Image (cartoon, rainbow, N blue to C red):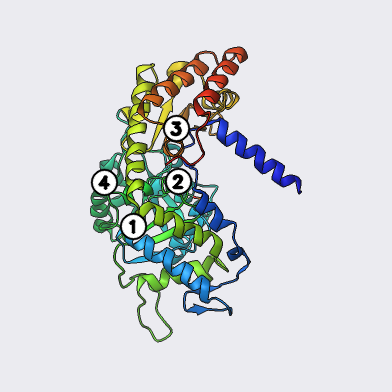
């Protein structure tokens, strides 16, 4: 047997024994995994259902159509493209569909909670486009919509991005749209993180306000790693994409063309099948119970952390994640992440707004409850987790104490399947 399978088993053990608090991770069901590890991986299918560039696509056409229809039902939208290989690919397609290189965009600053693809200088979005950004208020940790409007009116970006990787509050999409309309900008929402909660109506819906919406499928949505593009309602695009006959295309056509052949070749039909299975699961009533539990676990964890003297940015959470500012504990994000890993608790170091440390050190950590909720943990476990984190942070250089915490973590996770919901 190839040594790779020993490594996969080792990783399964690591995931089983530990507490997974990385906000962007989750555990997929056996059926999602079965779909991903299927013969569908053998099939080339450039194009879209009914319009392929390869023969033998009758079955994968059905797979992809099912994924699209389930996503439409789940989010209540008119248009879905399930082909993006990742969240970043979905986002790249939006840039290609809406902008020309050099155009101006406005996204949340990476150091304030935005994502690399929202205009970071080291990402294609920051390299190929002119970037202005918005952030949060220093006192409250909340998005400063007034400052955002001022910058938008002055800089007049062609596209605005409503989305985040590390912001624990809901977004006011109506407010974003009001500002975008004042300057005639396209409004794109990236709901990669909270998609599962949005699907179940537990957070504001972006669809009636935003022109286009992207997501990943593997975070709170609990599907395979991948991306997706959606529109509440298709519309005649106004971005100069004319056909050779001078006709204006519908935005759905422009977006489909931006994904394939714009930035990708053949779709990953085995992953698309995994997406279809996950959307089917998310349409089930049990997923609503799961999504509600994710949210209430996050609130319980945030409260338990605050009770132990931790500074949670913005004072709490509306979604599945929170940012912990560790400066009052005299430790940094890097050493905390490392010590927690030793205790079998995984999370990631993260910059906090107005951080005085570099992205490699950081003053904070980001915690999320999507994965631990899938494993069946409830509100009362959140108090235990906050206590364990507190023990590690208070004894960051004491390996003996940290190994003691690891034992307690392993006991807590004993007998809990990876997928328990
Ligand atoms: N958009 C946001 C808001 C994200 O948080 C992420 C991933 O963390 C992505 C896009 C990119 O997703 P991927 O890692 O699949 O490219």
Q: Residues within 10 Å of mark 4 (few under 14, many from 20)?
A: some
Residue on which the image places disc 1: 74
SS of the residue at dot 1?
helix
Q: Earlier in the sequence, mark 4 or mark 3?
A: 4
Residue at mark 1: C-beta within 8 A of ligand 1: no
From the viewer's side, name the closer residue of 6 and 186.
6
Marks 4 and 3, how far apart in space?
23 Å
Give the x, y percent position of residue 247: 36, 82
Residue on which the image places disc 4: 172
Residue on which the image places disc 2: 219
Q: What residue is shown at x 45% (from left), y 37% (from top)? A: 111
Residue at mark 2: C-beta within 8 A of ligand 1: yes
From the viewer's side, name the closer residue of 112 and 207.
207
SS of the residue at dot 2?
loop
Q: Residues within 10 Å of mark 1 (few under 14, many from 20)?
A: some
Count of marks overlaid on the render: 4
Q: What residue is shown at x 56% (from left), y 72% (from top)? A: 45
Residue 367's disc number: 3
Q: Earlier in the sequence, mark 1 or mark 2?
A: 1
Question: The C terminus lies in which quarter of the figure?
Answer: top left
Nearer the observer, disc 1 or disc 4? 1
Q: Earlier in the sequence, mark 1 or mark 3?
A: 1
Q: Earlier in the sequence, mark 2 or mark 4?
A: 4
């Amino acid at each position: 047997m190839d040594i790779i399978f020993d490594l996969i088993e080792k990783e399964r053990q690591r995931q089983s024994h530990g507490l997974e608090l990385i906000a962007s991770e989750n555990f997929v069901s056996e059926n999602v995994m079965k779909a991903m590890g299927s013969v569908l991986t053998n099939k080339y299918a450039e194009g879209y259902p009914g319009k392929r560039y390869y023969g033998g696509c009758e079955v994968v056409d059905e797979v992809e159509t099912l994924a699209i229809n389930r996503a439409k039902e789940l989010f209540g939208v008119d248009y879905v493209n399930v082909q993006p290989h990742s969240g970043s690919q979905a986002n790249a397609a939006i840039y290609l569909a809406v902008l020309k290189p050099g155009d101006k965009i406005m996204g949340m600053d990476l150091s304030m909670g935005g994502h690399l693809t929202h205009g970071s200088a080291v990402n294609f979005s920051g390299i190929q486009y002119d970037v202005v950004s918005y952030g949060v208020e220093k006192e409250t940790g909340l998005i400063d919509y007034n400052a955002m409007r001022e910058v938008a009116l002055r800089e007049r970006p062609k596209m605005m991005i409503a989305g985040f990787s590390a912001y624990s509050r809901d977004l006011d999409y109506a407010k974003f749209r009001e500002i975008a309309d004042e300057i005639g900008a396209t409004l794109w929402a990236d709901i990669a993180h909270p998609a599962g909660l949005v699907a179940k109506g537990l957070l504001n819906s972006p669809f009636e306000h935003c022109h286009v919406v992207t997501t990943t499928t593997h975070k709170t949505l609990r599907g395979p790693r991948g991306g997706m593009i959606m529109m509440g309602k298709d519309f005649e695009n106004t971005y100069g994409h004319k056909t050779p006959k001078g006709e204006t295309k519908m935005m759905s056509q422009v977006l489909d063309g931006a994904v394939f052949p714009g930035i990708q070749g053949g779709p990953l039909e085995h992953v698309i099948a995994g997406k279809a299975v996950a959307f089917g699961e998310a349409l089930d009533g049990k997923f609503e119970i799961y999504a509600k539990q994710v949210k209430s676990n996050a609130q319980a964890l945030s409260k338990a952390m605050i009770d132990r003297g931790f500074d949670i940015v913005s004072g709490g959470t509306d979604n599945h994640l929170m940012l912990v500012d560790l400066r009052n504990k005299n430790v940094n994000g890097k050493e905390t992440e490392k010590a927690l890993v030793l205790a079998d608790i995984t999370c990631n170091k993260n910059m906090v707004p107005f951080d005085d440390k570099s992205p490699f050190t950081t003053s904070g950590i980001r915690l999320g409850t999507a994965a631990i909720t899938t494993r069946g943990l409830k509100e009362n476990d959140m108090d235990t987790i906050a206590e364990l984190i507190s023990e590690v942070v208070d004894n960051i250089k004491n390996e003996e104490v940290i190994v003691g915490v690891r034992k307690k973590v392993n006991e807590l996770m004993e007998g809990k399947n990876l997928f328990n919901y």
